[in-house]
Amino acid sequence: MKFGFDIDDTLIDLRRHAFHIYNKKLNMAVSEDVFEQIPTVEIHEAFGLTAEQGGQMWKDSMPEIYFTDCPSYSDAKEVLNGLAEAGHEIYYITSRPKGYCLQTREWVKAQGFPVVDERFYCGMADHEKIDIIKRLALDVYVDDKPAVLNTLAGTKTNAIVKNQSYNQQADYIRLTNWHEFHALINDAKA
């Protein structure tokens, strides 16, 4: 089978990692409880920042957010490595900025995820992911953003949403813990 995965907030806990970085940089102590309730992908409002200030904070912090010690979700690496070992094709499709693509691919490899260079796609806008997913004819695609998954309507790709506080209204098979992945795949096929 062909499996596609977004990276940020699907395989790795990027927003939470950024949340901790914001707390440190802003010398604040906004609690994890606040983080768990943020209804948007953006985290700036929890720190009292405007959209413009939050956008600048994210832009200024990108290398630290993307390439430091951001943890992967428990069991994510094991699941993807198991899929690769079983002969399945693993594709990564991330909308990280083009200027970070090579560094992102190498970082993902260094974290222990199975990466085949030709199966790593980066640098497109979220809405452009659909073109790659369709061209690859993926069997399953996992992402945290409902807007991306919504583009898969009418395709044969089974869409799975990685559970996040901002995607609770999404009506897809929901991945809460990576150890559930194989059971979810069986549900998607049924």
Image (cartoon, rainbow, N blue to C red):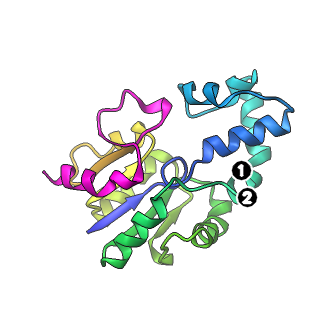
* 80 shown above or below 190: below
Q: Amino acid at mark 1?
A: Ile
Q: Amino acid at mark 2?
A: Thr
Look at mark 2 in the image and give the residue it sits on.
Answer: 68
Q: The N terminus is located in which quarter?
A: bottom left
Look at mark 1 in the image and give the residue it sits on.
Answer: 65
Residue 62 screen position, x and y as percent? 73, 50
Give the left or right position of residue 18, taking residue 78 as reference: right
Q: Quadrant of residue 86?
A: bottom left
Q: Crowding near pointer 1: few (<14 within 10 Å), some, many (20+)?
A: many
Q: Which residues are magenta?
A: 162-190
Helix, strand or loop for disc 2: loop
124 and 26: which is toward the camera = 26
Helix, strand or loop for disc 1: helix
158 and 14: which is toward the camera = 14
Residue drawn at 55 percent across, 53 percent down: 12
Residue 54 screen position, x and y as percent? 73, 31
